[in-house]
Amino acid sequence: MTPEPATGTSPGGLSGHTGTHSAATVIRFTRVRKEYARTGLALKDVSFAVNKGEFVFLTGPSGAGKSTILKLIFAEERPTAGEVKIATLSSATMRHRDIAKLRRKLGIVFQDFRLLEDRTVEQNIAFALEVTGAPRAGMSGRIGRLLTQVGLASKAQALPRELSGGEQQRVAIARALVNDPLVLLADEPTGNLDERATRGIFQLLREINATGTAVMMATHDLDLVKRSDCRTLEINHGQLVLDSAEPVPGASPPAR
Amino acid sequence: MTLAWREALLAFRRSPMLSALSVTTIAFSLFAFGLFGLVALNIREALTRLEDRVEIRAFVADRTPAEAAATALGDVQAFPEVATAALITPAQALERARRELGEFSDVFDAGILPASIDIKLKPGFRDPATVRAVAARLRTYDFIEDVRYGEEWVEKLQEIRNVATLAGTGLGLTFAIVAVIIIGSTIRMAVLARAREIAIMRVVGATDGFVRAPFLIEGALKGTLGGILALVMTWTASELIGRYVFAAEFFDVRLAIVGIFAGTVIGLAGSAFSVGRHLKAV
C-alpha cells in the first residue's frame, strides 16, 4: 500500500541538467516532514525527485536540513510524515532489515571520510564488498579498476593516515562506488579539503556522474555551485526554497 | 562466515590489551564462581558421606523362626527405597559390638544382643519422611520388636542439607549474575571501542546479523578462554588448599567442561546483549 505521490506537489518527470533524460526516478520525496524529538522541526513539506543519472547539488546554510535529507535517503532517519522512496523501496513500507538492502543501492561519502584507519586503501574498499557477501574472487581486479578511476592506483597498499585529505576522500568515493550504486550521496565531501583538492573531487564526481550514476552532493560551497550548471536544490529553515529545475510554488528565488 | 571469523580474530590482534583485559575479567568472575562451586560441591560431598551412614535397624524378637526372618528380609530387600538389607545374627551383633566398643568388650556376653535386620536406603530416600515410612512398614511384622534409626540425627541432617541448598542456590545465582554483568560491560567496552567501525559497516550496507557475527564469535572466544583460565585458577587453588588445609574434592571432567561451556555461553550472551543494545542505539 504505497501512497501514490500527488502529481500536483511532486516535481516528477523532471529531466536532469546533465543531459541524461531518463524517466527512472531514483529518489522521490513526497511532502516529507521530519521532526526530531529534541530539536523540533527539521524539514517541512519537502517534495522533489531525482532521476537516474542526474547530478544534483543540495545547498543551504548550516542547520537548514541538508544532512537530514541525506539521512532520510539512506534511512538513518525515518520521515515523521510523507514518503521517501529510493528506487522501489518506500519509507512507508520499509522494515528494519530492508535498510541494509537500501544502502547497497547507495554509495555514501562523508566530510570526514570515515575510513578504517588500521586497514590499507585496498582493504577499506574490499570491506564494503565483503559486507555484502561478495565472493573474494575477482575482488582485487574490481578494486584495482576503481582505484585507477579515482586516480589512486599506486596507493592500494597505503594506510589512510599516509594519504592527503583529498586522497582519503577519493578512497571513500571508490568505496562508495564498489557496489555499483544507483546514487552517490556526498555530504559536504569537500568540507575538509583545500581549493585544489575540492576541484579534484568535484571533477571526479562529475566523471562518475557521466558514467550514469546519479550524484547528490550536499555542500555550502556556493562558488562551486555557481561555477557549475548542475541542478540545485536549496534548503532553508527546513523548506525547499529553490529547485533550479522547476520553480517551487510560493518560494521566492534567493539571490544567487 | 569466514569473514566474521577473520574479523573476530583481527579484533584480538588489533586491541590485545583490551582483549586480555576482557579475558582476565571473565576469568576472575568465573574463578569466584568456581571457588564458590567448589565449596558447595565439598559441602554436598560431606553431606552425602554423612547420609551414607543413615541406617535403619529392625530388631528381631528372640526365637523367631529363621525362615520367617529370611522371608521378611526378602520382602525388605524388595522395598523400592532399600539399597541393602542384611540379617545380623546375635553372634554377628556381638562381634560388631566388641569391635566398635573395644574397651567394653568384656561386658558383652553371648546372647545379650538381639538379631536384627540392618537396612541402608538408596540415595535420595534418606530424608526423615521416607526413613519414618520405611520404619513404620517394618514395625508391621509382628516379630519385629523395635526399629531404631536415630530420628533426631536424620532430621538434623535434613535441616543442614536444606540450609546448604538454599544458601548455595542464592549465592551461586548472585555470583552468576555478577559474572554476567561484569562480562557484559567488558564486552560493551569492546563494542564501543569499535563503534566507528560498526557505523561504517552499517553505512556500506552490512546487515545487523553481519555486524553482530564477529562480536558474537569474539565474545564466545573470550568467554571460552576466560572459562579455561578460571578452571586452571580454581584447580590451582584447590590443589593449594589440598596441600596446606584439607583434602578437597575437585570438579569431575563433566563439571569442568560444563564450567568452560558456561564461560562460552556467558561471553556469547554478554556480547549479544551489548551489540544488540548498540545496534538499537545507532
Image (cartoon, coloured by chain):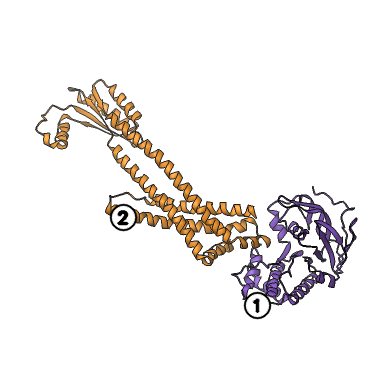
Q: In the rendered image, which residue does mark 1 sit on?
A: A155
Mark 2 crowd level (few <14, some 14–19, many ≥20, 10 Å Cα) = some
Quick check: can you spot residue A25? no
**Quadrant position of residue A154:** bottom right
What chain is tagged by disc 1?
A
Location of residue B262 in the rendering, given as x and y in whole percent from the top left corner:
46, 51
Mark seen at residue B240:
2
**Quadrant position of residue A60:** bottom right
Task: Identify by letter the chain in orange.
Answer: B
What chain is tagged by disc 2?
B
Mark 1 crowd level (few <14, some 14–19, many ≥20, 10 Å Cα) = some
Q: Residue furthest left?
A: B106
Q: Amino acid at mark 1?
A: Lys
Quick check: can you spot residue A115? yes
Q: CA distance from mark 1 to mark 2?
A: 59 Å
Task: Identify by letter the chain in purple.
Answer: A
